[in-house]
Amino acid sequence: MRVLFDQGTPAPLRRHLRPYPVDTTAERGWSTITNGELLKRAEDEGCEVFITTDQSIRYQQNLGGRRIGIVVLMSTSWPRAKQQIPAILAALTNVLGGGYEEVPF
């Protein structure tokens, strides 16, 4: 499962997602791309899950028919995210194939 972190996603989370390959939008040079184009590009590049803290994404984008799963973390706080690692890992599995899930903190 190939994972893409949006800006704001706590970077230390990456090491808890092993063995999954994780890229960030910054590493890919996609920091300035709008969400609609970003999701399309991520799908085209083989990303299977997009992790974001953008709680408005489901209202701003038409998520129907997407192949990429979207996990929304309800906070950018690493200490709070760290406590939810089991829920985040479960969400990754649940959204494969185009699902959407929010992980509350």
Image: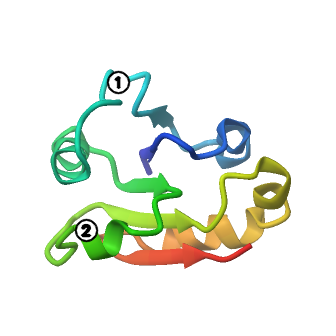
Q: Which residue is mark 1?
A: 28
Res 94 visible:
no
Q: Quadrant of residue 36?
A: bottom left
Residue at 17% from the left image edge and 73% from the top image edge: 62
Residue at 46% from the left image edge and 33% from the top image edge: 24
Q: Residues within 10 Å of mark 2 (few under 14, many from 20)?
A: few
Element type at marker 2? Answer: helix
Q: Quadrant of residue 48?
A: bottom left
Res 73 visible:
yes
Q: Which residue is mark 2?
A: 60
Q: Is residue 36 left or right of residue 2?
A: left
- Circle on res. 4: none
Q: Is residue 52 left or right of residue 42?
A: right
Above or below residue 54? Residue 42 is: above
- Give x and y (percent) for residue 31: 35, 30
Q: Quadrant of the C terminus?
A: bottom right
Residue at 25% from the left image edge and 68% from the top image edge: 60
- Give x and y (percent) for residue 97: 30, 70
Element type at marker 1? Answer: loop
**Image marks 1 and 2: residues in contact by CB distance under 8 Å:** no
Q: Is residue 58 left or right of residue 62?
A: right
Rendering colour mode: rainbow
Residue at 75% from the left image edge and 68% from the top image edge: 86
Q: Residues within 10 Å of mark 1 (few under 14, many from 20)?
A: few
Q: Could you tell me how far apart the alpha carbons at marks 1 and 2 are, in whole angstroms?
A: 23 Å
The three-letter amino acid code for the residue at tag 2 is Gln
The three-letter amino acid code for the residue at tag 1 is Arg
Q: Earlier in the sequence, mark 1 or mark 2?
A: 1
- Give x and y (percent) for residue 18: 66, 42
